[in-house]
């Protein structure tokens, strides 16, 4: 079962423009994820892929430090 948009691992909504929201992880502000839809809707597979990529970038960044 797909995750709900509002459950995306550590990301918080920072800006809303129409039906699009800009979600940013506090530790990775340079890699925002733009999401179309409401928090209660299922996240599309491509959105989950974007979030996984952002979380991998976060892990890589933490390993470098």
Image (tube, rainbow, N blue to C red):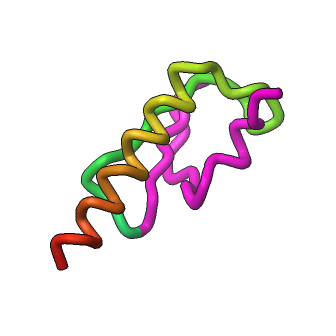
User: Closer to the camera, 13 or 59?
Assistant: 59
In the rendered structure, does residue 17 fall within the stretch colored magenta?
A: yes
- Furthest toward the bottom, the residue is 65
Specify the quadrant of the image occupied by residue 16.
Answer: top right
Q: Is residue 47 left or right of residue 61?
A: right
**Residue 39 image position (x, y, % from top left):** 75, 38
Which image quadrant: the C terminus? Answer: bottom left
Magenta stretch in the rendered image: 1-26
- In this view, the residue farthest toward the left is 64
Nearest the viewer among 65 and 31 is 65
Measuring 59% from the left and 20% from the top, which residue is drawn there?
Answer: 45
Q: Position of residue 3 (x, y in %)?
A: 75, 36
- The picture places residue 34, in percent across and down from the top left corner, at 45, 33
User: In which quadrant is the N terminus drawn?
Assistant: top right
**Residue at the spot x=53%, y=27% of the render?**
47
Q: Is residue 35 visible?
A: yes
Vertical side of 49 occupied by 32: above or below: below
* Quarter holding residue 33: top left
Q: Which of 57/24 is in front?
A: 57
Q: How many marks?
A: 0
Does the image show residue 18? no
38 horizontally vs 40: left or right: left
Give coordinates of residue 52: x percent, y percent.
47, 41
Inspect the magenta stretch and tell me whether residue 25 lies in it. yes
Q: Residue at x 76, y 26 (%)?
A: 42
31 on left or right of 55: left
**Which residue sits at x=30%, y=47%?**
31
């Amino acid at each position: 079962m797909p995750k709900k948009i509002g459950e995306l691992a550590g990301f918080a909504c920072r800006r809303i423009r129409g039906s699009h929201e800009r979600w940013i992880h506090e530790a990775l502000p340079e890699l925002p994820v733009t999401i179309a839809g409401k928090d209660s809707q299922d996240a599309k597979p491509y959105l989950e892929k974007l979030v996984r990529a952002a979380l991998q970038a976060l892990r890589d960044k933490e390993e470098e430090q």
